[in-house]
């Protein structure tokens, strides 16, 4: 039983670290592309688009996922119910 709970909390911390790394590394990509002196090629625009989407997922998606994992369910009330 103890090993099961340790593995759940280990997964929670892995998700926290993954979220922080997602935010930091994609922000680094966006800063690097911002300070370039020449025009962007098509593949670089695609990379910027992916970095923006991934950054927003790290900012908006990971906190909700980690909250749900730490509370073993969604603690912020019912959603989609009127």
Image: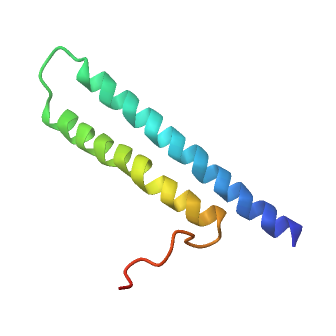
- The residue positioned 35% from the left and 85% from the top of the image is 82
Left or right, 30 with respect to 7, comes to left
Where does the image place residue 70, in percent across and percent down from the top left? 65, 62
Count of marks overlaid on the render? 0
The answer to which of 74 and 23 lies nearer the viewer is 74
Rendered position, 53 above or below 75: above
- The residue positioned 72% from the left and 64% from the top of the image is 8
The answer to which of 36 and 77 lies nearer the viewer is 77
- The residue positioned 50% from the left and 74% from the top of the image is 77
Where does the image place residue 21, in percent across and percent down from the top left? 51, 39
Q: Where is the N terminus found, in terms of image quarters? A: bottom right
Q: How is the image coloured?
A: rainbow
Where does the image place residue 41, in percent across and percent down from the top left? 14, 30
Task: Name, please, the residue furthest toward the bottom.
Answer: 82
Task: Name, please, the residue furthest toward the top.
Answer: 37
> Image quarter for residue 31?
top left
Rendered position, 75 above or below 36: below
Where does the image place residue 47, in percent across and percent down from the top left? 26, 39
- The residue positioned 46% from the left and 42% from the top of the image is 22
Rendered position, 28 above or below 57: above
Left or right, 35 with respect to 80, comes to left
> Image quarter for residue 81?
bottom left
């Amino acid at each position: 039983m103890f090993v099961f709970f340790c593995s759940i909390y280990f997964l929670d911390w892995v998700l926290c670290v993954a979220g922080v790394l997602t935010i930091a590394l994609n922000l680094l990509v966006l800063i690097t592309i911002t300070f370039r002196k020449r025009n962007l090629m098509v593949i670089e625009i695609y990379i910027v688009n992916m970095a923006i989407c991934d950054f927003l997922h790290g900012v908006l998606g990971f906190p909700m996922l980690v909250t749900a994992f730490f509370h073993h369910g969604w603690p912020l009330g019912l959603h989609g119910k009127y």
